[in-house]
Amino acid sequence: MRENLLERMLFYTGLCVTFVFILAPVTFMILMSFSKNPDFLGQSFNFTIRHFYEIIYTRSLHFPEYLANSLIVSSISALISTAIAGMGAYAFTRFNFPGKFILLVGILALSMFPQISIVGYLFRIMAGVGLINTRTGLVLPYTAWVLPLSLWILISYFLQIPGELDKAAYIDGCSPLKTMWYVILPVASPGLFSTLLLAFIFSFNEFMFALMLTTDQAARTVPVGISLFQGLHGEIPWGSIMAASTLTTAPVVILTLVFQRYIIQGLTRGALKG
Amino acid sequence: MTSLKRSQDSRQYSYDWPWVTLLLGPGLFLLCLLILIPVIGTIITSTNRDITFMDGKWVGLSNYAELFKDTAFRQSLRFTISFIAVSVPLELLFGLGLSLLMNYKSSFRGIIRSLVLIPWAIPAVISGRIWELIYNVNYGLANYIIEQFGFEKINWLGTSSGAFWAIIIADLWKTIPFVAIILLAGLSSIPETLYQQAQIDGASFFRRFYSITLPLLRPVIVVALLFRTIDALRIFDLVFILTSGGPGGSTTSLSQLGFKYFVGGDFGYGSTLSVIIFLCALVLSLLVIKFGKFSQEAI
């Protein structure tokens, strides 16, 4: 019994520390975005929504454009990479071909390449084809960048689908493509959904490529916008930065919390390979 | 973590080139065009003197020779190695603790599992800016708490040791949850009966952790360790936001130094640095493949 009590005390202490450590920064961000003055700690808190008004309606800050760019680029990248990874995962789990294992390991190794080893030359390629500062110029590298992870997650889902399903479809005269479309994809839809979510979040949060490949609001994404956010009058406008951060974080966090189960599944499968 | 062997009997169509080409083609095309070619291009560029507005010239390995004499490179190498050496063990330690909390049966289980995803989901740039504000000397949360306990204010981002620990803490906030989620998957695959048996035998809480949890979790811990090391090796976003490499270049990471050269137009030298980072990551990823659950019959 005493053992049990000790265990429970440890648990609740850990729980409190975790809650505070995780939530304090987020709370601080939200409070700052609603505060008239940045130095409200230990002083009085004056509520205002001016910062939100500012970042949405001050044209020179371009925040709505950045947000639109981010949403468009990440959604398209997530959709394309999930579709391509779905096809790839189907080939890897349902067909036999020489060099399959090497190819798979090679793709895994690709996913661990540091971004810095790509970004310099990528800039040259994009400049060469005139895609600097365009959304297409971000969608392409993002799609490729999240592809290995998407592929891994989907392979682990596809492996769980029993072969009898394919066999039945095959006997009924379905081609491989038809089998994939009508049999595998519907069954794997939770996996496709986790992949889509993770690919979206990874693209939405990406920073280095966007920093290198964009120059202004035509394609610049929110992370780059927020990183370069400077005040007009010297002093860092913390209220506005935190308002922009709160607005950007809200959809991602809500998405994450609502679909918690899919995200955790996707993450663990992506990391542990089936 | 289901058995991968099952795929053997699920294989319907064997060695069907047109289908395999059709299904794998688009993905391989994209990966080659946007990842493989840039990497090869970077390796080739690293053997050139390649600076914007100057004539290019093949210089062999002299960029590399120069790099190893470069004090800025040595400084950033030292920072990156110390960052890995301090952050990764702490992440694993706290991540393990957090995963135990997440696995503990209580009415808070659902809440805590949602909660840990918040730092993970917030873009690194935004968490960087939040922490930058927290470390603000005058009205930041960190100094406010320190003052409540009666200590002197700390100039977090203005001194090199302050900046180092500031980066470590901010990084831990974001990465502990990730490690915990990975380890949780390992934890939940340990059969409950083992613990019940041990409890009947009178094994204490610590004994059970030490004799059951740790050994069974070891493969997952190794994978998490390698993943985190690769990720820490390429740290960029957080440093870029929090310190921009300062003060005095003491927190410039390898990725950031390389990026600086690219932005400055020195592609040859920037590529040389990138190749070094790439080679380190490659060695580590080969270790992942070795220690991960890989085998020829897996797929």
Image: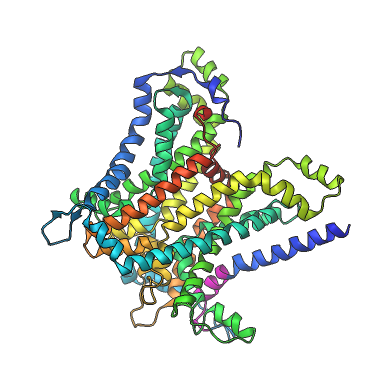
- Describe residue A59's horizontal placement relative to residue A39 as left or right: left
Which quadrant of the figure has residue B90?
bottom right
Nearest the eye: B218 or A120: B218
Is B111 part of what is drawn in magenta?
A: no
Q: Position of residue A37 (x, y in %)?
A: 49, 83
Q: Give the camera-side residue of A117 and B20.
A: A117
Q: In the picture shown, does residue A273 fall above or below A161?
A: below
- Is any atom of residue B80 visible in this view? yes
- Extreme residue in the right direction: A1
Residue at image point 19% right, 52% down: B60
Say if residue A50 shows up in the picture: no
Q: Residue B93's spot in the image, x, y percent?
A: 62, 59
Q: State the residue in front, B90 or B265.
A: B90
Give how far across and how far down residue B16 sits, in percent: 38, 18
Q: Is residue A33 magenta?
A: yes
Specify the segment rendered in magenta. Answer: A25-39
A43 above or below B252?
A: below
Q: Is residue B13 above or below residue A114?
A: above
The location of residue B134, given as percent across then percent down, is 52, 75
Residue that extends furthest to the left in the rendered view of this protein? B55
